[in-house]
Structures are given as C-alpha cells and as structure tokens.
Amino acid sequence: MMAGMAAPSPWPRLFALTLVVCFSAPRCLEARVEPTHGFDSFSQDEELQLGKQNAAEVMKQMPMLPDSDPVVQYVQRLGGKLTERAPGYKWPYNFHVVNVKEINAFALPGGSIFVNLGTVQAADNEAQLAGVMAHEISHVVQRHGTRAASKQMAAQLPLAILGGIMGNSTLAKAAELGISFGVGSYFLKNSRQSESEADLLGTDIMYDSGYQPQQMAVFFEKLEKQMGAGANSLINQFLSDHPNPGNRAEAVTREVKTLPPRTYVADSADFREIKARAAGMKPLTSEQLAAMQKQGAPPNATAPGPEVTPSANLKVFSHNEYQISYPENWQVFGDQSSGVTIAPRSGVSQNEVSYGVMIANYQPEDAGASLDTATHELLASLRQSNPDLKQIGHDETIRVNGVAGKSVDLVGSSPIKDAQGKPLEERDWVVTVQRKDATVLYLVFISPDKDFPSMRPAFEAMLRTLQMR
Ligand SMILES: [Zn+2]
C-alpha cells in the first residue's frame, strides 16, 4: 500500500482557493519571467562604481551626441518609460546616443546604456527601438556583464594568487586582471544563454510598457537578413555582441502567449519626428571613427554634427545697436541689455561656448580712447578672466561695412576635452568695431582650433552682414 493514500489530500482545497483568486484578479494569469541570478563576485556598489568608470571612459573615446540634442532627449524619455517596468534591483539607468552610423547598442554594468544613432535611423517604428533598449535593460537587470567577468576572474584567480598580484577588493582584483567593460571589451559580448534571457525579460518589459514584443525579434531578424545578404560592417558588431540564441521570434511569441492579450502602440508621432530628424544627421562611419581614434583626435570635437555645422542660409538678428545675420540653424542666447551669444544649441553648455560668437559692448576706461587703445584694454580684460588666452600674430586694422575695426587672433582652452581629459586648443577670433559713442562693439568668434578653418568662412560671412545703428 502506498503511503499517504489513507489521509485526505490537501490539494483539492488549495486548488479551489487558487481558482477563486484567479477569477477575481486577471493579473494572476500573467507569468512574468523571473530575472536570473548567477555567481557574481561584484557587490551592487562595486558594480555601480565599475560601471561609472567605464561609462566615463566610453564617453571620452566615443563621439557622443550632447544631452541637449532632441534625439538624445527622446531616447532618454523612451528609456525612462521602459525602465519603469524593469523588474529587479532599481539600477540608476541612464541613456546616451553615440554619434556613429554602425547599428549597435550596449549596456554597461550598473545601468549606463548606449544606443548608436545608426540604430535610431534603422528602426522602422518606436517598438523596434524600444525592443533593442528593453533587451539592453534586461542585460543590466540580470547583471550579465559582471557575471561573465566573475566567471573569467574565477578562472584566472588561482594563477593570479600564484603570481602574487591579488588585491583585496573585487574591484582591485578586476583591475589587476585587466577586466573592463569599455569600448571593444570582451565582456560586452554576450553568451547565447544571456541573449535568450535578455530576450525573455525584454519581452515582458515591452509588453508591460505597451509595445508589441515581437518587434524586438523583427528588428534582430531584419539585421540578420541584411547580414545574410553580405558581410555588412554596419551590423557586424551588433550581431556579434548579441548572438542569436536560436528561434528568437518563436521564443518571444511563446513568452507573449503566457500573458493576456492586450493592445499595443507600434509607433508614436514623437518617434516619427525623431526618426526624420535622425535621417538628416550624419553620424560617423566606422572608418571615420577608426581614423579619428588612430590620430588620437577626440571624436567629440571633430564631429560637430549638423547642428554645429553652420547653415548657409542666414537669419537676421536685430539689436538696438546693430544688426547681424547668422546661420539659421544656430540660436541667439542672451538679451538686448547684456551681450548675446549666437551659437549652435550644442555649442553652448553651462555658460561655456565651444562653437559660436559672443557679441558685447566694451566701455574703455578713458572715454576718448582710440579704437586701438580700447582694443588693447579689452584684450587685457579678456585675459584677466581667461589667463591662458594668448595672442597670436599682430592685430590688424580692418573695415567692417565701412566702419573702422580691429582683428586679433587668440588661442586658449576649449571647454571640449580630448581623450586624455585635457582641454582642446581653442581659437578665438576677436573683432572690435568703433561705435559713435566712443565705446566699442566686440565679437569673439569661437571654435576648437582644428575646426577653425572650416568655421572661418561662416564667421566671415556673419561679420560681412554686421551693420551698426
Ligand atoms: Zn544582447
């Protein structure tokens, strides 16, 4: 006789209870994927610290679109919407757009997620872009990066101990073993197992955010089809970092079937606007990026992007005291009472100007000062607030639309930093113009030195339109 046959089974009663709960709460039918855990020698704090260091490194090495760019702001909004639905530990997620044509996206441990502009350009609808991002978020939730690194460290540690190079903390050990997650890192390459986990969790995040999860698989498969049509360096890296775990679409569909039917948003006006904008942008190709990194040139500065590159179409700015035309894709900052700055939106940050022109009045100490004296006084006062400004060559006497002026070239430090964190050399072209009331109007045309030759024609075109009132 089998044990337990005599006693009444507790199961029927439990079963009934479960049914009751299910009928009254439809969400009980929904089976969300549980984030997986695995051996991880990094604490959450260590993972955050490591992620931060690596994110800073990536931002120095890669050409980033500025946070003020509408495409970045859109990606950040979409990211915020998705991470609200992400399960597990609440990492401080942050989203960045890399100004590169290659279709790729990657997530660093701790929540920094980088999406290439090429990915925004390649997505057919908002759901596809959301799919890529939900997939990356899922890698963060499941700590795939530090788990892979932990495995590697465990394999290397015995050797490290023998070699006597072991630090105390996991971070120190990781540093000694050369573990990093930056550009080109081995740990950005995910295993097929991690891929399938990221797909499943990503499916739930998409579903919960109202995006049709299949669009994630559609996007991945679209890339694979293009790849099948011939080696395509634009998508190579993405598929190599996120290898197909096999039957992506089926796995997503299977997961969706465990969830109640719902309606989805496929697209948004917001996405279409951003997609149109991105289509007009010219991110760096892999070749351009490689060439720049080889030269050691900071890609951030050499890729001013369409917003910085001055449009040939000019717009008029009328001030009480003068009128000047400027590239229509630039903006006027400041007001009539003080000086103004005319610059591309991304050329101005925290009151620092990296590209653009500042226009203001200068009142010489001596009311009867000549333009020459006034100009030298002005230069001295500019140097007082920017001690590293140096004059190159002599000041020249010029005429601006019939009015006497002076032209002086200076070099200083740009707010833009190079790959080592050192400020780029900046060119400041100062022009002073005599005003009727013995004050001086001055203009400072600003650009990183190496971009100055390409900016100069636009600066000169602006100066030619200057009319004093
Ligand atoms: Zn992946």
Image (cartoon, helix red, strand yellow):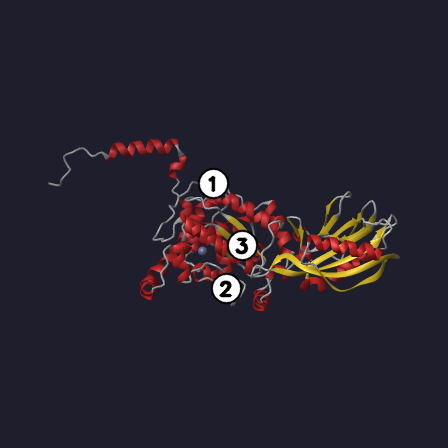
- Horizontal and vertical percent for residue 400? 85, 57
Residue drawn at (86%, 55%) of the image = 370
Label 3 sits on a secondary structure element that is strand
- Horizontal and vertical percent for residue 403? 87, 56
Mark sitting on residue 262 = 1
Query: What kind of residue is marked 2?
Result: Asn
Residue drawn at (75%, 55%) of the image = 380
Residue drawn at (87%, 51%) of the image = 368
Within 10 Å of the Cα at label 3, are there few (<14), some (14-19), or many (20+) other Cα atoms? many
Q: Quadrant of ligand 1?
A: bottom left
Within 10 Å of the Cα at label 1, are there few (<14), some (14-19), or many (20+) other Cα atoms? few
The one nearer the camera, 196 or 100, is: 100
Left/right of residue 350 with respect to residue 1 in the rendered view: right
- Mark nearer the N terminus (2 vs 1): 2
Q: Which residue is mark 2?
A: 236
Left/right of residue 409 with respect to residue 88 in the rendered view: right
